[in-house]
Image (tube, rainbow, N blue to C red):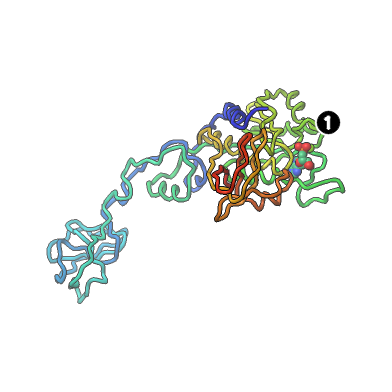
Amino acid sequence: MITVTEALDRLFALATPLAPETVPLAQAAGRVLAREATARRDQPPFPASAMDGYAVADAAAGDSLTVIGESAAGHGFAGSVGPGQAVRIFTGAPVPEGATRVVIQEDTTRDGDRITLQANLDAPTHIRPAGSDFRAGAAIPAPRRLSPSDIALLASMNIAEVAVTRQPRVALISTGDELVMPGEDPGPDQIIVSNTFGLAALLQDLGALPRMLPIARDNREALRSVFGLVDDADLVITIGGASVGDHDLVAPVLAELGMEQAFHKVAMRPGKPLMSGRFGKATMIGLPGNPVSAMVCGHVFVAPVIRALLGLGAAPAPRRTAPLAEPLAANGPREHYMRATLGPDGITAQGRQDSSLLSILGQSDALLVRPVRDPARAAGEMVEYLPFG
Ligand code: AMP
Ligand code: MG
């Protein structure tokens, strides 16, 4: 059995970043920027008014000025403003040459083409200098998962297409004679497949393209035929059948099909029968069948592998720390990922930790990480956890 850290290192050795592709900006949200993007212009490209009012040149409180024209958004004033003059101006409009500030319209009174500035003017100039948001050449560094804010910034930089890492294609294979799809009529000895759905959702969140293959029954032929559908996947994930029972055929069938196994067992709870290797061009991860084990391994192993494939670097799932709200007993020889809730007093491990209990997973906010042979811990001691979402 190897440690979680060793298992991750071996996975990272298999999962090299995918190539970039170019996509239109409207399809770039959530994708990983593969190459630095640089602004193609200054923003604003001209000194712009921040308010509706009058652009004036060195005018003082109480002055009377002549309105000589108008500058609206998209339609600037061609001339310049001199002493004794004002240009009617609106938000986003170019500030005419010669103007040193915009007086907001609330601070003026107008009579025909004359305005009078009130006695107390506010301090700001209400002018956004050219390039005050960003300058041409300003960079958004890569790699970076593009947020809605990034997309807005890229658009205003006049970048219509971006280079992003290709999305990892992930084939998901559940194995077991007992499994039927949600919505089907299960036989008396059957249960509903849950892991492929949970993992597909996790993969989508991570920016991958999951594809559910048909459920493979617990016989060599069925497994072989489903593996035949893997096609061009970058990552193949099997679920279940990875233990050492008579019906656990994933490892032997994959070996027959030429998989080079990187490891088979990891010292963790839940999730000990975890397998990995190279299967053709794809990385292969064999997850345990117990629903919570599969989801925990999804957070601990699959998510970092997807981030590595996306070019976001080879790093374990980020951890946070919190005080224990309640004491914990000593941990054994395997790293333990305990379903836990977060509250005002800190983090609390759930009372029931059986790896089949999806309801408990659904009520949890995080996985509290217990290191190998961690001693008993008192309330208030700091512990590490992996947050969900
Ligand atoms: P296995 O690893 O195949 O021995 O499965 C361990 C446990 O997980 C068994 O109770 C299976 O019925 C259950 N299981 C396996 N695969 C799935 C799945 N895709 N969805 C839900 N439960 C599963
Ligand atoms: Mg099974």
Q: Residues within 10 Å of mark 1 (few under 14, many from 20)?
A: few
Q: In this picture, is 60 found above or below 318?
A: below
Q: Nearer the viewer, residue 373 or 232?
A: 373
Q: Nearer the viewer, residue 164 or 182?
A: 182
Residue at x 26%, y 71% (from the top left corner): 106
Residue at x 72%, y 34% (from the top left corner): 229
Q: Nearer the viewer, residue 363 or 20?
A: 363
Left or right: where does residue 162 sit relative to residue 186? left
Residue at x 79%, y 43% (from the top left corner): 179
Residue at x 72%, y 39% (from the top left corner): 213
Quadrant of the picture in which ligand 2 is shown: top right
Left or right: where does residue 106 sit relative to residue 308? left
Question: Which quarter of the figure has residue 8?
Answer: top right
Question: Which quarter of the figure has residue 96?
Answer: bottom left
Q: What percent of the width, then of the height, locates residue 7?
A: 62, 29
Residue 186 shows in the view: yes
Q: What percent of the width, then of the height, locates residue 180?
A: 79, 46
Q: In this picture, is 149 found above or below 208?
A: below
- Respond yes or no on whether mark 1 lies under 8 Å from ligand 2: no
Q: Residue furthest bottom?
A: 111
Q: What percent of the width, then of the height, locates residue 97?
A: 19, 56
Left or right: where does residue 74 sit relative to residue 203? left
Say which residue label 1 marks. Answer: 246
**Where does the N terminus fall, quadrant-wise?**
top right
Q: What percent of the width, then of the height, locates residue 197?
A: 69, 46
Q: Residue furthest right?
A: 188
Q: Residue furthest left?
A: 83
Residue 389 shows in the view: no
What secondary structure is marked by label 1?
loop
